[in-house]
Image (cartoon, rainbow, N blue to C red):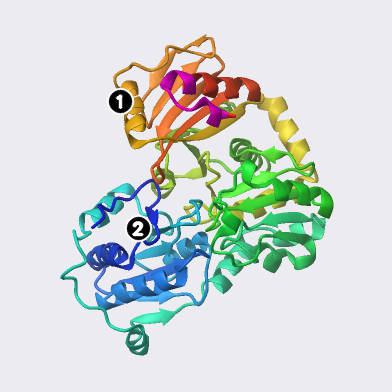
Amino acid sequence: MANIRFGTDGWRAVIAEDFTFRNLHRVAYAAAAWALEQSSAPKVVVGYDTRFLGRAFAEYTARVLASAGVKALLPDSFVPTPAVSWATREFGCAAGVVITASHNPPEYSGFKLKADFGGPLLPDGVAEVEARIPASADGLPPLRSLDRLRASGAVAEQDLMTGYLACLRERLDIEAIRASGLRVAHDAMFGAGQGVFSALLGAGQVAALRHERNPGFGGQPPEPIERNLGGLAEAIAVEGCAAGIAHDGDADRVALFDERGQFVDSHTLLALLLRYLHKDAGLSGCVVKAFSSTSIIDRMGAAYGLPVETTRIGFKHIAGHIVQGDVLLGGEESGGIAAQGHIPDRDGLYIGLLVLQMMAQRGKNLSELVAELHEEFGAQAYRRIDFRTSAAVKEDILQRLREGRGPVRIAGAPVLRVDPFDGFKHYVEGGWLLVRPSGTEPLLRVYAEAETPERAQALIRDAAGQLGLPVSQAG
């Protein structure tokens, strides 16, 4: 049996290798045991995205939960992950489950856990669920049939999308967006976010891309990063759009293009929203960013008099701050952002619409808003390369870094200090470089921020060469 461990955002594995019904039984059984300790009559929402066997895995999870005495609420179709987060709190559930591997390649599936407050289950809770995963599915109680569980009410069909869409209408100025006439190109990447923008704004205001069911995602991971979104950049010009917005497979992450088809990275997006929410909307609070996020946020926090907290990578760490205090904005490098006044979780659909609201209320193009931001706080360039390598090479590199045998100069600049908070962040004059293993895939990630794109790329290429990573992958 597989040794099941949760990464930065749930358990993920290759379908039919480690993500099997028997292993799913083990994980769902642990989730049921944990939920029963939280409440005498717990309910759990079980959602799923558009991946292969998503519905079957969700129904199986519901059977495990209900057979153990946990009522399972099951939607009749795929749903975005933020809809499950919203529903977990809205319906008074002990937890939420989403069958999704988010942005991972098509051959993966996964199991995300949501807490009763409507955000990711926090690290302590995740550890408690992990500790309850049995070593084998052998000996687990038999499952009742789905038909009998439905007949008894232990598994109930639950409409999530009607309430979730109503929530978005209530918390955003949808009418201002519609009245502005802003046309948006929306790339759902064949994921669970398809149809949401059209339902809210009207089909005439949305140029929809990859809004069909395709469990193979066209042979490409549904990860909303620039190299995967060439069609979106082209559609902006062809369709005459003011912006392009993309979402990952379960729609909790977002990517953005301006009216010229230029990519607006997640760091710039986070800074734009901070400026808008504080200066235009008059909101205040702590700003929480992940360890791999831009240093511009620190400068903005100092200028606005707002505290800035840095967390480990993984939105569950940011969510921990949100539920404990007054947080204005929380975000991470991968495009997961939460804003004050909404659920304490990533919601790529909400954030995409909030950007359109900002444009409508400011009456400016996205490129103009970015230029204003850079004029006030300076521009930083950011790059990330994911290096595929063997487990042995990856561990050797990490061990060298743990022992302080990493680069002392990178692209000609001396390393001023190394912060091992979550990975190994090497600070140089005018920027930094971070080396960190992926928590969900067999990858070593190398991130860099510098004054220019060329400088950021040079930092990665030089560090990769020194560490023995394939420089050819660095572009």
Q: Nearer the viewer, residue 287 or 285?
A: 287
Q: Secondary structure at mark 2?
A: loop
Task: Examine the structure image and report whether residue 466 is included in the region drawn in magenta.
Answer: yes
Residue 17 image label: 2
Locate the C terminus by quadrant: top right
Q: Secondary structure at mark 1?
A: helix
| Left or right, 13 with reference to 273 | left
**Boundaries of the magenta span:** 464-474
| Left or right, 214 with reference to 387 | right
On the image, the x and y values in percent for residue 406 come to 38, 17
Q: Main secondary structure of the magenta part?
A: helix
Q: Nearer the viewer, mark 2 or mark 1?
A: 2
Q: Nearer the viewer, residue 43 or 175?
A: 43
Residue at the spot 43% in from the left edge and 28% down from the top edge: 435
Task: Name the amino acid, label 1.
Answer: Gln
On the image, the x and y values in percent for residue 293 come to 51, 33
| Left or right, 11 with reference to 308 | left
Asked whether residue 242 appears in the rendered view, the answer is: no
Task: Name the amino acid, label 2.
Answer: Glu
Number of marks drawn: 2
Residue at the spot 64% in from the left edge and 41% down from the top edge: 226
Q: Residues within 10 Å of mark 2 (few under 14, many from 20)?
A: few
Asked whether residue 142 appears in the rendered view, the answer is: yes
Q: Earlier in the sequence, mark 2 or mark 1?
A: 2
Q: Nearer the viewer, residue 144 or 346?
A: 144
The residue to which callout 1 is attached is 399
Residue at the spot 62% in from the left edge and 26% down from the top edge: 380
On the image, the x and y values in percent for residue 42 come to 30, 71
